[in-house]
Each structure stands twice: as C-alpha cells, then as structure tokens.
Amino acid sequence: MTLPAVEAEVLVVGGGIAGLTAAARLALYGRQVAVASSAVSATALSTGRLMLGDEPEAQEWGAFFLPQFRRLGAYYQSAGRPVTAFTNLGTPLKQSVVSPLFDWTAEDREVAVVGLAGRGDLDPDLACRELARSRRVRARPYWVSPSARLEDDRDAFLEELGTALKDLGEDAVVLPPLPSKEPYGLLADLRKRTGKRVLEPATPLSWPGRRLQALLEGTAAKLGVRMLSDRRLLSLHIEGRRAVKAILSSGARTQTARFSALVLATGALASGGLAVRGTEVIDPLGVLRVSAAPASGVASPALRAALSAGAVARRGRAVSATGETLANVVVAGSLHRGLSYPLGKGLGDVAVHAWKAARAVEEVL
C-alpha cells in the first residue's frame, strides 16, 4: 500500500527541536517545507528547559521563538544570564529561557514542596533531602490528596488544592507539573486563590517537555510547515552527489517524498537516528559516514565513543559513507558529530545548531 507522493522544496526528517527549528526558519524564508517524524521526540521527553549562549544565532533563535511561544500562551522570556533552577529531584539545572512567574529557581529560598497523591512526578521527601544536602534552599515536604481529579473536574480540583495550599506557612509552593494544555492558567488561578507563588520544577519525561514540543509544532504550523506524522525514513535515493527522493513508511504503507534539499535531524544513537552493528555505530540507512567525537564523562571508552558518535559533515553538508559530500543534504542537531551525549550539549545548543543549519540549506537552494 502506498500513500500519495509528497513534493517539497525542503524535506526535514525529525520532528524534535532541531527539525522544527530548521523547518520554521526555512518557512520564514518563504520555503515550502515538510517535516516527517515517526516517534516521540527527545524534546518531548526532556525537561523542556533551555540554556542559550550569547552567540548571535542564539539571540536570533530566542528573538524569534519566544514571542511565538508567548502568543501560544506560554510565558517564556530570556533571562539574559544563566539562572539556577531546580528539578523534581531537587537538583540544580542551569537555564536562560525562563517563565519568571512559575519556574522554580534559587531565588525562592524558602519553599513548600508539595506532592499530589497519585502523581509520581514529584516526591517532596526525596527533593527536600537533596535540597538539604546542597543547603541552597530551605524546603519542607508536604503531601496533598485532592478527592477531585483535574482531568474530570477542574474547578473542584483547584478549590480543594487551593484550600490546602493556603494553610501552608511558606510563601512559595512547588507543585508537580499538571496535565493541562493551559498550565500557566492553572498556576495563575492557584496563585490568585492562595496568595502564594506557585511554582513548577523542571521535570523530564513529563508535561514540560511535551509542552515545549507542542509550542515548536504550533510555531511551525503557523508558518505553513506541513507536518507528516508517523513517517519513518526508510531509504534515500542518491544520484551523483545529491539526494533526489526519500521513501517514508507509516506502518505497512510507504510514501515517496521528492525535494530540492534534505535536512536530517533524526538525533544520534540514543534518539534512534543512528544504530549499532557489531561494535560499530552506523547510519541505519547505510548512506552517511559516522564517527565519534572526543568526549569525557563515561567510564567505558567504548560506550563513550558510541554515545558521542554522529554524522560527519563538511560545511554543514552530510558526508556519504564513501567520503563524498552530499551537496543538498544538511545535518542538524544532535545527529551531527560533536553534539550528542556525553559532550554536555543540551537543547539550547541543538536548537542553535539547527538555526544555523537552515542557513546552510539556503545556500543549497
């Protein structure tokens, strides 16, 4: 079974922060862009927090995306300098893109850390023990068990929770991420009901990462980017030094995509963009050259080399397995050699790399 063929000036493979950043910037240039993605992105599984440097491209990324996020209801802004925030485990995390009203940062010195029965995103006892070790913050743990569920009765849930929080002695209250499309509205409502600063920790594998993913997708969609969900890159057809078409798969169905330029933003080994064959890390398509970048932080040299492997590129363009530069294939984000774990590169570095990669695509077209 086949799906209708796709025609686009630029096909982006990978729907995380790298792919959507490149797609959005290219759409800003007026390019016809399609994004193919096949699974939950690493962005959606992340803490949803960003650390941007002071390079011009990082400032450009923030100047474009943050106003778009605010238009979609997310109160993000650039702090201008690194801010120490806290995770749901009570550990510190540096970020420079913040929600100053609702992010839990070191500026809140005395906090009540509140767990909600039935939600495993935040264990206040565990978080407070870690905070006590660091001596950064005075924190006390609490548990609350609302009888109403947020998903079933928003008003009853907020009434119960607000009443419980109002009796706490601390002025700042940390809650686990709440499952809502409008989280800031919920937190603002609780702030109004209680008169307290109601905060949220940076939490991986939870709602903050999913929200960031949704904001990126919403921004790209507003710019006219075509989203091809549940599409896995099955094969690439190369003629000479140019990729001319891709075969995508969706379950048992296949789809042909033709393009003038291709952006590969599929992530590295941990994200499924690369694979292992024997003791080698390889491109599962058999098209790209892969090598490891110098890295530290993992005890096993073999594991360190595997996790730091990435696609080789010259001036942003992918290098084939036979050593030739593919003229119209650009590598973006953590698939690129040197951007993957354990090199310490986070979402901010990946986003900025993809922002630059869009410029390389423009040179191709």
Image: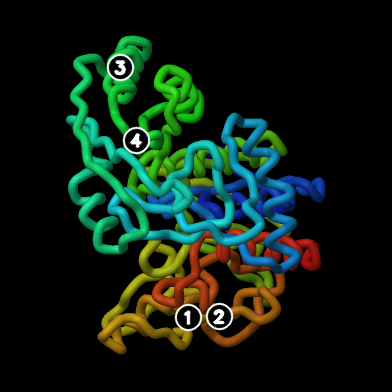
How crowded is the residue under tag 3: few (<14 C-alpha within 10 Å), some, or many (20+)? few
Q: Identify residue for label 1.
A: 290
**Type of the residue with mark 1:** Val
Residue at 42% of width from left, 84% of height from top?
295
- N-terminal of the pair, mark 4 or mark 1, is 4
- N-terminal of the pair, mark 2 or mark 4, is 4
Give coordinates of residue 119: x percent, y percent.
23, 34
Label 3 sits on a secondary structure element that is: helix
Label 1 sits on a secondary structure element that is: strand
Could you tell me how far apart the alpha carbons at marks 1 and 2 are, in whole angstroms? 6 Å
Tags 4 and 1 in contact by the CB under 8 Å rule?
no
Which is more foreground, mark 4 or mark 3? Answer: 4
Instruction: Out of 278 and 356, give the one closest to the viewer.
Output: 356
Tags 1 and 2 in contact by the CB under 8 Å rule?
yes
Tags 3 and 2 in contact by the CB under 8 Å rule?
no
- N-terminal of the pair, mark 3 or mark 2, is 3
Residue at 39% of width from left, 85% of height from top?
296
Q: Identify residue for label 4.
A: 170
Query: Is residue 201 visible in this depiction of the protein?
Result: yes
Could you tell me how far apart the alpha carbons at marks 3 and 2 are, in whole angstroms? 57 Å
Q: Identify residue for label 3.
A: 163
Tell me if 172 is positioned left or right of 215 in this view.
left
- N-terminal of the pair, mark 4 or mark 3, is 3
